[in-house]
Image (cartoon, rainbow, N blue to C red):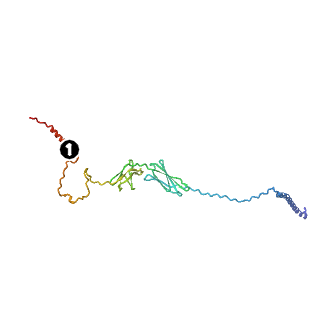
Amino acid sequence: MLESPPVADREEEPMSRRVWFASACLAVAAVTAPSTAASADDPTTPSPSPSPTATTMPLPVLPTASPTAAPPAPVGDLRARVDDTGAVDVTWSAQSGDTSYSAVATGGGRMSRIETTTTSASFSRLPAGVVVLVTVTAHGPDGDAPSATVRVTTPAAVPPVAGARMRAVAAGLVVSWIRPSGVPSGTRYLVALTGTEGGRWSRLVAGAAVTFTGLTSGRLYSATVTTVTDAGRSSAVAVEPAVWAPPAASGPVAAPGQAQPSTAPSTAPAAAQPDAAAPQPTAQRTLVSSPLAAAGLAGLAVVLGGIAIGLLLRRPRGRRP
């Protein structure tokens, strides 16, 4: 059976442990104290750098991405047609953002361009009988829209008239011409008359002549004649200008050598007028009515006289007894 140590021994054991722990702490402190003091007194020993303090940097502000501006849309409802004069008329509808338009017509080796702010354009003097390509481009503040195109065929050339002339008559001026050959039925002719005073007249007829009335006497007038068909028009043919004046009133024409009868009223007194009931003396007849006849008669008398003298000279003489 084991015996427990005495109480005195059990109390000394914790005390020795505490003494040992305290001695160990003092020993550690004695060892580290010189180095600490030396480091504090030695000026060559660098002091530890302070620990960096964490700071918050502001983030850069990035620009906000703006939406990309879309270009304008192409024009809509683009149409082209040929009018009565042979010109190509083009129309279209505007889109949102359109500010102006460029219309270009190309055909037959020729190009015509029109810049406009409206929604229509007209191209004249295009070649006849060719396919014309018309391109319309819309312009806007954000750029140009894609182009829209349309095709149209111009009519064939219409032949002009020939032999156009103008002459004055009592009623006015007559413009006439010769119809061109090969034109279809229903062809008409547009005649335009212009006066120097600024007056203008026009007639559309199916014949080959037209008369313009109501003109001013003594004024100069010029005219043009254009062939018009369902396919188009010809070039205008100019007519030589003419002056219109009403013809003078016609009266009795006196025979050559006679005085013109006077139409002025007689101012002689009534007593001097011959009485119509009184017998008038018979007018003497004049044998010789002209100097030429008188000369002829004189010549004839000379000839007859010469013949008579010749006969007398040739009469035979009688013998003497």
Amino acid type of the residue tagged 1 in the rendering: Ala
The part of the image, by quadrant, that contains residue 58 is bottom right
Q: Is residue 298 visible?
A: yes
Which residue lies at the image location 16% right of the left edge and 40% below the top edge? 309
Task: Provide the residue designation for mark 1.
Answer: 298
**Residue 109 x, y percent position in the rendering:** 48, 47
Residue 132, horizontal then vertical, whole percent = 47, 50
Relative placement, left or right, of 310 versus 101 is left
- What is the x, y in percent for residue 83? 44, 53
- Expressed as whole percent of the image width and height from the top left, the position of residue 216 reads 36, 56
Q: Nearer the viewer, residue 235 or 318?
A: 318
Residue sitting at x 20%, y 44%:
298
Disc 1 is placed on an element classified as helix
Q: Quadrant of the N terminus?
A: bottom right
How packed mark 1 is, by other alpha carbons closer than 10 Å (few <14, some 14-19, many 20 or more), is few
Q: Nearer the viewer, residue 192 or 76?
A: 192
